[in-house]
Image (tube, grey):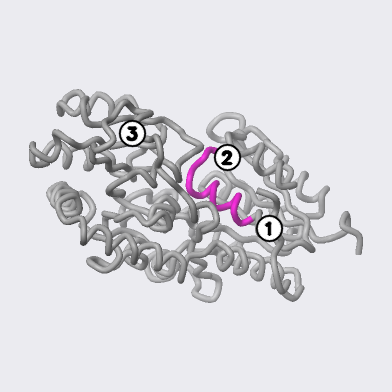
C-alpha cells in the first residue's frame, strides 16, 4: 500500500491556540503511527499552533464557521471527509464534537471518536451535556482524559461503559528535562530574591482566577510584600480580572504575561504553581508544572485528585476555598523543605504515569483497532 492509499485519521478541533487540549493534540501527532496519514481540521479558526502542526508534516484545514450556528458546516465537512475517504475522525472540544461527529456519520466514516477534556459540575452546562450525551450514540468510542472523567461519563452522564475509554493526558518529558527559569524575574523587573508564584491557563470562568486573587489579598502582609504572581494566558476575563486586581490593591503583586511560547521557562522560575480551577479534566498545565519539579497547590476537581495526592506530591483544597488557597500558599512559601519534597515527588509521578508516549500509544491503538489494523510496535517522533 502506498503512502497516499494508507488510512487517513482526521482530528477535528475548534481552533489552535496554545492551550491544553491543543498542545496535547500537537504532542500526540508528534508520536503518530507512521503507517497512517493524518490531518487536522479547525472549524472556527486556526491559531498560533497551526504552523507547528504543519512543520511536523500534518496539514491543517480551516473551515471557518459562519456565525454561532452554521448547519451547512456539517454538510461541507461531511463532503470534505467523504472526498478524502477518512477512516477515522477524532473530535476535540464542544464545537468540533457537535459538528464533527454528525459530519463523520453522514460521510460514513468507520471510526468516530471524541475526547472529553473536562467535565462541568452537575447542573452546569446542561444543554451541552445533553448534546454530548446524544452524540455519544454516534461515536465508536469516547475518551475520558483521566480515569475520573471516564467514570463520570458513565456514572453521571449515562454513557455506555463499553464505549468509554480512559486515556490519561500526558506531557512530553523531553521538553521539561532541562527547563530553567533563568532571567524570568529580571524580565519582569523583579529582584532576583523575590518569591514568585503563578497560574497558567485560559482566562475564563472555570479556571478560578478570581479565587486566587482573593487569596492573594488575604495573604499575610509580610509575605505578600515580597511576593509576585504571574498570570500566564489570555482570554475573555482579562479585562475583568485586571479590574479586580485594581480593586483589591494587588497592582504591585500580580503580573499578566499574556500568551507565551516559553511556558516551561516561566514555570521553572516559580516557587509555587497554583491551579485554583472550579472544574477540570486532567489539565496539561498541571502535568507540565509537576514535570518541571514545582510544588503544586490545586483544587480537588475533575481528574486532579487522581494525580495529586495531598501531602505526598502536592497540596489540595476544595474548589472555591479562598482561605484554603491562602493557607496553602503560605505553607509552601514558609516550609521550603516540604515544598522541595512535594516537588520531587511531583516529577516522579509524571515520569511514572503521565509520559506522553503512553498517551500517544493508547490513541494510536484505539485508531488502529477501529480500522482493523494491529498497533505499531513504536511510534514516529516528528522533528521538534
- Identify which residue, 222 or 303, lies in the foreground: 222
Give the x, y percent position of residue 298: 28, 55
Q: Which disc number belongs to residue 185?
A: 3
Give the x, y percent position of residue 218: 10, 40
Could you tell me how far apart the alpha carbons at marks 3 and 2 are, in whole angstroms? 29 Å
- Identify which residue, 267 or 353, lies in the foreground: 267
Is 188 on the left or on the right of 139, as rendered?
left
First-in-chain label (1 vs 3) = 3
Visible residue check, residue 207: yes
Q: Which residues are magenta?
A: 17-28
Quadrant position of the N terminus in the picture = bottom right
Q: Are marks 3 and 2 in contact (CB under 8 Å)?
A: no
- Identify which residue, 34 or 173, lies in the foreground: 173
Visible residue check, residue 129: no
Of badges 3 and 2, the one in the foreground is 3
User: Vertical placement of 43 versus 84: above or below?
Assistant: above
Of badges 1 and 3, the one in the foreground is 3
First-in-chain label (2 vs 1) = 2
Residue position marked by numbered label 2 in the rendering = 16
Q: Residues within 10 Å of mark 3 (few under 14, many from 20)?
A: some
Q: Are marks 2 and 1 in contact (CB under 8 Å)?
A: no
Residue position marked by numbered label 1 in the rendering = 381
User: Vertical placement of 32 versus 41: above or below?
Assistant: below
User: Is the magenta region chiefly helix, strand or loop?
Assistant: helix
Amino acid at each position: 500500500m502506498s503512502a497516499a492509499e494508507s488510512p487517513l485519521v482526521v482530528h477535528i478541533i475548534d481552533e489552535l491556540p496554545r492551550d491544553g487540549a491543543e498542545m496535547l493534540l500537537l504532542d500526540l501527532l508528534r508520536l503518530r503511527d507512521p503507517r497512517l496519514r493524518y490531518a487536522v481540521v479547525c472549524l472556527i479558526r486556526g491559531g498560533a499552533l497551526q504552523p507547528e502542526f504543519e512543520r511536523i508534516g500534518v496539514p491543517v484545514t480551516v473551515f471557518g464557521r459562519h456565525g454561532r450556528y452554521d448547519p451547512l458546516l456539517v454538510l461541507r465537512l461531511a463532503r470534505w471527509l467523504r472526498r478524502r475517504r477518512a477512516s477515522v475522525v477524532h473530535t476535540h472540544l464542544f464545537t468540533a464534537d457537535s459538528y464533527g461527529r454528525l459530519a463523520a456519520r453522514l460521510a460514513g466514516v468507520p471510526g468516530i471518536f471524541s475526547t472529553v477534556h473536562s467535565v462541568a459540575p452537575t447542573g452546569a452546562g446542561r444543554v451541552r451535556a445533553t448534546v454530548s450525551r446524544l452524540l455519544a450514540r454516534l461515536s465508536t468510542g469516547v475518551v475520558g482524559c483521566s480515569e475520573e472523567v471516564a467514570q463520570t461519563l458513565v456514572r453521571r452522564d449515562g454513557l455506555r461503559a463499553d464505549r468509554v475509554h480512559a486515556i490519561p493526558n500526558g506531557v512530553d518529558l523531553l521538553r521539561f528535562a532541562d527547563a530553567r527559569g533563568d532571567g524570568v524575574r529580571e524580565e519582569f523587573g523583579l529582584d532576583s530574591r523575590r518569591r514568585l508564584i503563578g497560574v497558567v491557563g485560559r482566562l475564563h470562568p472555570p479556571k478560578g482566577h478570581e479565587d486566587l486573587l482573593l487569596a492573594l489579598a488575604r495573604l499575610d502582609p509580610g509575605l505578600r510584600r515580597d511576593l509576585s504572581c504571574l498570570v500566564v494566558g489570555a482570554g475573555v476575563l482579562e479585562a475583568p480580572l485586571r479590574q479586580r486586581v485594581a480593586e483589591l490593591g494587588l497592582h504591585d503583586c500580580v503580573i499578566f504575561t499574556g500568551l507565551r511560547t516559553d511556558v516551561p521557562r516561566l514555570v521553572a522560575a516559580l516557587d509555587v504553581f497554583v491551579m485554583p480551577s472550579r472544574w477540570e479534566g486532567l489539565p496539561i498545565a498541571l502535568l507540565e508544572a509537576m514535570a518541571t519539579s514545582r510544588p503544586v497547590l490545586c483544587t480537588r476537581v475533575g481528574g486532579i485528585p487522581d494525580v495529586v495526592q495531598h501531602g505526598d506530591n502536592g497540596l489540595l483544597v476544595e474548589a472555591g476555598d479562598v482561605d484554603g488557597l491562602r493557607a496553602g500558599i503560605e505553607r509552601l512559601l514558609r516550609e521550603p523543605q516540604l515544598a522541595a519534597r512535594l516537588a520531587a515527588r511531583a516529577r516522579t509521578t509524571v515520569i511514572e504515569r503521565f509520559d506522553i508516549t503512553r498517551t500517544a500509544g493508547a490513541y494510536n491503538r484505539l485508531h488502529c483497532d477501529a480500522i482493523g489494523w494491529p498497533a505499531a510496535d513504536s511510534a514516529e517522533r516528528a522533528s521538534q
